[in-house]
Image (cartoon, rainbow, N blue to C red):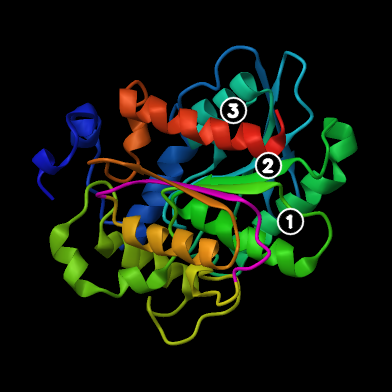
Amino acid sequence: MELDHVHPQFRQAVKRFPRLPLHNRLMLRLLNGLMRFAPHPSPGADVTVTERRLDNAWVRIYIPDAEHCGAALLWIHGGGLVIGNPKVNDRDCGAYARELGLVVVSVGYRLAPRHPFPAAIDDCFEAWRWLQGAAGELDIDPARVVVSGQSAGGGLAAALVQRIRDSGGVQPAGQALLSPMLDDRTAARRELDAIDHRVWNNRNNRAGWSFYLGQPAGAPEVPPYAVPARREDLSGLPPTWIGIGDIDLFHDESRRYAERLRAAGVPCEFETVPMAPHAFEMAVDAPLTLAYFEANHRFLSAVLDI
């Protein structure tokens, strides 16, 4: 994809983003090693950050120093199911805590290919159950929690709310999916390789899904909660916000998921950013990025009654 397809507000950030061969296992190990020690944007002032180790997952907790609103956000980071950790979203999680008065719990989950499905979704479910059990300690209402995530984290968030629905008990107040990775069948469409989407292309997408599923992307059958877009019954899921750029590889699968949610009776807002590639949010001061997060914050404020 040529740079002139990208909105001018995002071009400089996209131009600096390296094109990485994430189908290479050695590259994945190197990247994850570097990411553990690389500096990340700070969560900012007026937010206290702590960590807690669970049985398999770990969580990074952001609490505003000012009095919080009694609601929480369970956040799941991206990275194609194969790279990343909660620290990569320190700035975003800090902003949610500071600007909306939320307690934010970001999930550190196990990554493929070393830990294929169901490791990541099991870890996210473990973090959800921990958050529910720690509601008193965190001084939050367990019914005022939104599940959210970006990219692969958005896909895991979608799968998590499906699993929570089937498990019963307290349900999320909503789900907010940012540029979510929802459907492995996109990765099986080889004609998309030639487009070479910016930041996250279909070759990396195929590698991420295949490593996670332990089988080729687009195979006839997948286990429950492995691929959220493959679930037939979407009824009973919480109010949803999906935001994505219109030149993102995941745009069409996200739009179809939004349409299916609405058809199942689930309130769903679908926010599209023009000429925006995957991870356009790295252009943090771009007017389109700021408007995007304003829409996201409005949804969170509404479903959490802030």
Q: Residues within 10 Å of mark 2 (few under 14, many from 20)?
A: many
Q: Is residue 301 magenta?
A: no
Q: Which residue is mark 3?
A: 96
Task: Describe residue 61's horizontal placement relative to residue 70 as left or right.
Answer: left
Q: Position of residue 95 (x, y in %)?
A: 55, 24
| Amino acid, disc 3 | Tyr
Q: Which residues are magenta?
A: 234-247
Q: Earlier in the sequence, mark 3 or mark 2?
A: 2
Q: Position of residue 199 (x, y in %)?
A: 27, 46
Residue at (59, 28) in percent of width and height: 96
Quadrant in which the C terminus appears: top right
Cα–Cα gap, marks 3 and 2: 16 Å
Q: Earlier in the sequence, mark 3 or mark 1?
A: 3
> Is residue 158 visible in the rendered structure shown here?
yes
Residue at (33, 68) in percent of width and height: 206
Q: Earlier in the sequence, mark 2 or mark 1?
A: 2
Cα–Cα gap, marks 2 and 1: 10 Å
Query: What residue occupies the far bottom of the structure in this picture?
Result: 220
Mark 3 element type: helix
Q: Residues within 10 Å of mark 3 (few under 14, many from 20)?
A: many
Mark 2 element type: strand
| Amino acid, disc 1 | Glu
Q: Which residue is mark 1?
A: 126
Of residue 268 and residue 135, the one placed in the foreground of this image is 268
Q: Position of residue 176 (x, y in %)?
A: 55, 46
Q: Which residue is mark 2?
A: 59
